Amino acid sequence: MKITNYILIACCLLLVAITPAHAFETSNDSYNINDADFRKLPNQAFSTPTPTPTSVPQKIMTTETNNSFIHISIDPILIDFGPLTATTPVIRTANLKTIGDNYYLKAYEEQKLKSGNQLIPDTTCDDGVCNEARSSIWKNNLTYGFGYRLPNFENDSFRQFSDISEGDNPVNLLDNKLLQNIFQTKIIYKLNIQGTQKEGIYSNNLIYMAIPRY
């Protein structure tokens, strides 16, 4: 019997909009005003439309095998970070719930946040060494990238998701802890970009798996 027959999956879609900055110039003595963009500003909001996914992943997955029951859900399934401002981190929270006996909880990302050929990297935290297996402090607004934390992490500690496109194995969210009955937790996502990040609509899928122990 292959374990892959009984892996339950909940999927979370990430969306990010990065828009161009608009500015005008003034000078004193001659008082020059470059108003090419200034004329557009009153009562006008600059925004990038959020695309509608062609297929929305299921929020809840349930199965029964050999008299055992496993359920996994993630809410919300769409995490919209909205338009971002450089060096201003954005935090989003999701609720993860699983029900079952003797199962492990794992997760991975399908790729980096991506728009065309442009990527937003995963964070390496303030010390530059956090990864999918090691959490570290992320408080500096000049530290960029995407990461997550769980309530059992140390304060302000984050880590990366495993990137399946780079051959990483799914990460054990709870350090290989065997779960029983009902388990609920919050997953806190953090995203911060630098000023040179190219504009665009960035997206990615996060996959959460409940894997029974055999």
Image: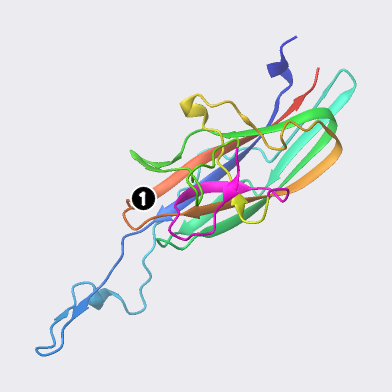
Residue 50 visible in image: no
Q: In the image, what residue occupies the spot 50% across and 47% down? A: 146
Which span of residues is magenta-colored? 134-153
- At x 58% / y 25%, what residue is drawn? 169
Left or right of 5? Residue 43 is left
Q: Amino acid at mark 1?
A: Gly
Quadrant the C terminus occupies: top right
Residue 164 percent location from the top left of the image? 52, 28
Question: Residue 164, relative to residue 201: is it above or below?
Answer: above
Where residue 138 sits, quadrant-wise, is bottom right
Going by the picture, which residue comes out furthest to the right? 67
**Is residue 103 found left or right of 130 in the rendered image?**
right
159, 195: nearer the viewer: 159
- Colour pattern: rainbow
Dot 1: what SS? strand
- Please state the horizontal and vertical placement of residue 90, each as a whole percent of the image: 52, 59
- Residue 189 among those drawn in magenta: no
Q: What's the residue at 33%, 38% (across, down)?
A: 117
Which residue is situated farthest in the top direction here? 1
Name of the residue lying farthest toward the left: 30
Residue 48 vertical placement versus 202 (above, below):
below
Picture quadrant where residue 40 is located: bottom left
Is 151 in the magenta?
A: yes
Residue located beneath label 1 in the image: 200
